[in-house]
Image (cartoon, rainbow, N blue to C red):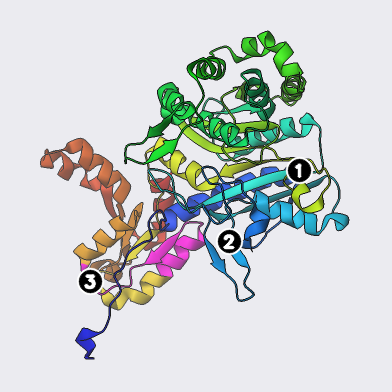
Amino acid sequence: MSKDDAFRPKARRPRGLIDRRGPQLAAERDLVAKISRVYEAWGFEPLETSAFEYADALGKFLPDQDRPNEGVFSLLDDDEQWLSLRYDLTAPLARFVAENYDALPKPYRRWAAGPVWRNEKPGPGRFREFWQCDADTVGAASPAADAEMIAMACAALEAAGLSRDQYVVNYSSRRVLDALLQAIGVGEGDHAVRLIVLRAIDKLDRLGAAGVRDLLGGGRKDESGDFTKGAGLDQAQIEVILNFFAADDQAAVMNASFDMLSGNGAFEELTLIGGVLKSLGASGNAALDFSIVRGLEYYTGAVFEAQLISGDGASFGSIGGGGRYDDLVSRFKGQAIPATGFSVGVSRLAAALQQMAQTQADGPIVVLPFDPEGMADCFSIAQEVRAAGFSAEVYLGGSGPKAQLKYADKRNAPLAIILGGDERANGQVTVKDLKLGAKLSAEAGDDREAYKQAQDRIQQTIPRADLIAAVRKALS
């Protein structure tokens, strides 16, 4: 085979996965650092578990999936046991606690951050790999532990940079759905039907009442033509569910349903959570919402979901959630071990914050060697800029001035520092404010004369000794 006939694989990214470059990675790392500082301030210790778990340890808990080897990425190990990439950070925690139960303090409080993988149908904003940052308390049965999770979630989101009018953490309890299903004749033995109802209600914010109505009934075909089997409820049952979960005044519905909700402890649970949230000063950003049920099957009690709110009051969707999962560790131990936790969707939160700001994070200041003989001086300048506390790099390609400036634009550099032959001879540098240039260019539009008049503001040649002061002024 000749060299020209050699096989060349097609460069292609796997479906549902993304490549993250500098600004996005930096934003996600920054979020993890800020959120984890809150978790540790509230007494949670860090824990890192492996990306792979035995498939049977993960369990049958994925949304829209009914078997461990569906919805996860799996491989058969050389000892004939199935390994799966973790679909969240909670199932590995349950395995870790069960494996190290005697050595751990009870309750055990831990936080963790890392990527998780789900082998499910990708869509807009829905990826097969994404980062989460979790905190969990294992061994505390009181709803006060759930309330603490909600309050800490509020603190974490504010540490991430959100103001109090930009988010809400809605909460409810799985016991509410259990009581309602029991009231309409869907008993605990109807596991398959209850699971479909659960997952249908979890889609209320995305599909609206009409879409959920179809899922509660005969089923629904989505835009791609895929059909999802429904729960098969009759119209009377469907109306009861929709009227309950879509009600405007949730507190009034709860009080009116006291007999039904008190029967399994849901009323008392939610009342205690509300009281603790008030004492923690978090009640202003935590709201009772019965439609919060969460799609993961392992939740057993309180459930909560963080929503990002835009300036006009619209929701960007879920950026985190969690709840009580008292049976997850018990699968391994055969004894009751209560647990509750909250997870921030780091990748989704970072993307939403960027969308809300409608800005791209600045790249480094780029030093451009218009005169190749001045390369050593360019490195000296970059080092000086870094010593002053700014990110900087030197252009190392072989192209001329025009291409160098294009490179700086592609790096989203706020400033370009130009060192040509004239600047070197005169002990000067040229500082070009690329962000200001882009702004003034957009404002000038087709008026090139106006743009030319702005050049003195965009680009200045200054003594080398004045460089850092000029950089600080431009970036202030």
Q: CA distance from mark 1 to mark 3?
A: 56 Å
- Name the one closer to the observer, 344 or 439: 344
Nearer to us of marks 1 and 2 is 2
Assess disc 3: are there few (<14), some (14-19) or many (≥20) residues with their C-alpha within 10 Å of its C-alpha: few
Q: Nearer the viewer, mark 3 or mark 2?
A: 2
Task: Say whether residue 306 is visible.
Answer: yes
Tell me if 278 is positioned left or right of 214 in this view: right
What amino acid is found at the position of numbered circle 2 in the picture?
Ser
Q: Position of residue 389 (x, y in %)?
A: 51, 56
Q: At label 3, which amino acid type do we have?
A: Ser
The residue at 33%/72% (across/down) is 396
Q: State how far apart marks 1 and 2 are (Cα).
A: 25 Å
Q: What is the residue that sits farthest to the bottom in this orientation?
A: 1
Q: Secondary structure at mark 3?
A: loop
Residue 172 point in image, percent of width and height: 64, 26
> Is there a contact, CB below 8 Å, between mark 1 and mark 3?
no
Relative to 283, residue 466 above or below: below
For residue 116, what is the image quadrant? bottom right
Q: Is residue 331 above or below residue 256?
A: below
Which residue does the image show at 49% across and 50% down from the upper left?
A: 27
Task: Identify the mark nearer the N-term, 1 or 2.
Answer: 2
Work out which quarter of the rendered image holds the C terminus and state it. Answer: top left
Residue at image point 16% right, 45% down: 452
Tags 1 and 2 in contact by the CB under 8 Å rule?
no
Q: Please provide the residue range marked out in magenta.
A: 380-400
Find residue 399 and name its label.
3
Give how far across and how far down residue 33 sits, in percent. Answer: 61, 50
Work out how far the residue at label 3 is from the one at label 2, CA to CA, in angstroms.
47 Å
Residue 359 in magenta?
Answer: no
Q: What x and y, as percent, mark residue 91?
A: 66, 51
Q: Which residue is mark 1?
A: 137
- Can you identify the residue that label 2 sits on? 84
